[in-house]
Image: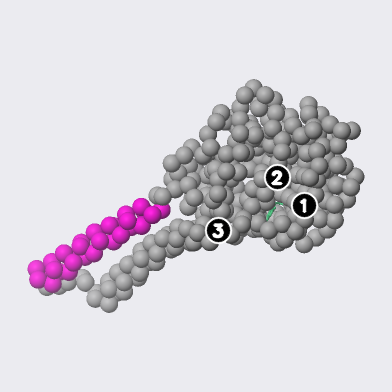
Amino acid sequence: MMPKYSLIVPIYNEEENLPELYQRISALMDRLDGPTELILVNDGSRDRSLELIRSLRDRDRRVCYVSFARNFGHQTAVTAGLHFARGQAIAILDADLQDPPELILDMVHLWQQDYQVVYAQRIARRQENWFKRLMAYCFYRILRRLSDIDIPTDAGDFCLLDRRVVDALNAMPERSRYLRGLRSWVGFRQIALPFRRDPRFAGEVKYTFLKSLSLAIDGIISFSKVPLRLATYLGLFAALVAIASILLVFYWRFLEPGSPLTGMATLTALVFFLGAVQLVCIGILGEYVGRIYEEVKGRPIYTLAEVAGFEEAMPPERC
Ligand code: UDP
Ligand code: MG
């Protein structure tokens, strides 16, 4: 018998959260109206997470897991979970209990009302520092402006997806996976479910500033060509400044003897300005070319070290 629901949880060094996470999710699984599989994706954890996951699997056959050969990142971990999920409705949530598992019941309710994508939208982030909140606030709004598709603001990866949506996501060959964007891109009937994001239950944030920044750049580059156009605009602007300064130089040289033109300083400023514009443009080009390079290499998105629970159907006593 195949599971009706799949719950995907990416795990990276979450040993302190796993026992509580399992408690809350198993209570949830008992309340869902069909057989449910819990897919734990171990993203190359260096603590005891994998051992704990193995022992959960021994205790409860509804727990399945996939373990990466190294750390590949959160988006890749979720992608792997989507590849393995067998349910008709598939939910994605974080391991640190910032996404309350109980909300999945409300999501299922909406799914039964024929919504294929139910995404949780944060109306409050409790106990996250102001810097992270400000960055997130600005980022989602900039992305929305820049991209051609309608990517909702303040919606993370916490969501429930219909089988058809997951099939569409799995059919996408791209390596750089900004899932919240891809999820909007596929279409279908989508609905937001507002919720308050809880603080992390235990442990430290695994998304360092650099990881978040790289996710943000991934989001913008994957879903917008505006930065490339920005390079053109910057170039045009620089050309205008150059023309204006040539005119000014002529004017001061020939028509006004007491010229305020202080040669070196103006020249240095202009050289730096042009240098900066060029570097920014090359950087933007580099971002796109780098992604083309990644795609062309065609390497698999992740390497698996261990997989358990997918070879067999759901055990009857749990269905
Ligand atoms: N995570 C992961 N790989 C990573 C970083 C994070 O699988 O390289 C997982 C982590 O275990 C957690 C989720 O992604 O389940 C979200 O991470 P975190 O809570 O640190 O980030 P937040 O989104 O809360 O800032
Ligand atoms: Mg978190």
- Three-letter residue code for mark 3: Gly
Residue at left 80%, top 38%?
Answer: 313
Observer-nearest of 318 and 276:
318
Q: Of helix, strand and loop, which one carries label 1? A: strand
Earlier in the chain: of badge 3 and badge 2, it is 2
Give the color scheme: rainbow, by chain, secondary structure or one colour: one colour
Observer-nearest of 178 and 167:
167
* Alpha-carbon span between mark 1 and mark 2: 10 Å
Q: Residues within 10 Å of mark 2 (few under 14, many from 20)?
A: some
Which corner quadrant holds the C terminus? top right
- Magenta region: 227-256
In magenta stretch: residue 306: no
Q: Residues within 10 Å of mark 3 (few under 14, many from 20)?
A: few
Q: Is residue 5 visible?
A: yes
Q: Of helix, strand and loop, which one carries label 3? A: loop
Task: Residue 118 in the image: state x and y as whole percent.
Answer: 63, 32
- As drawn, the label of residue 84 is 2
Left or right of 134? Residue 9 is right
Q: Is residue 7 above or below residue 106?
A: below
Q: Is residue 172 above or below residue 150?
A: below
Left or right of 104? Residue 28 is right
- Three-letter residue code for mark 2: Phe
Residue that numbered label 1 is attached to: 307
In the rendered structure, are the residues bearing label 3 and label 2 in contact, judged by CB atoms less than 8 Å apart?
no
Q: Of helix, strand and loop, which one carries label 2? A: helix
Left or right of 2? Residue 245 is left
* Quarter of the figure with residue 106: top right
Q: Is residue 196 visible?
A: no
Task: Residue 235 in the image: state x and y as whole percent.
Answer: 30, 59
Task: Residue 282 in the image: state x and y as whole percent.
Answer: 40, 64
Residue that numbered label 3 is attached to: 298
In the rendered structure, are the residues bearing label 3 and label 1 in contact, judged by CB atoms less than 8 Å apart?
no
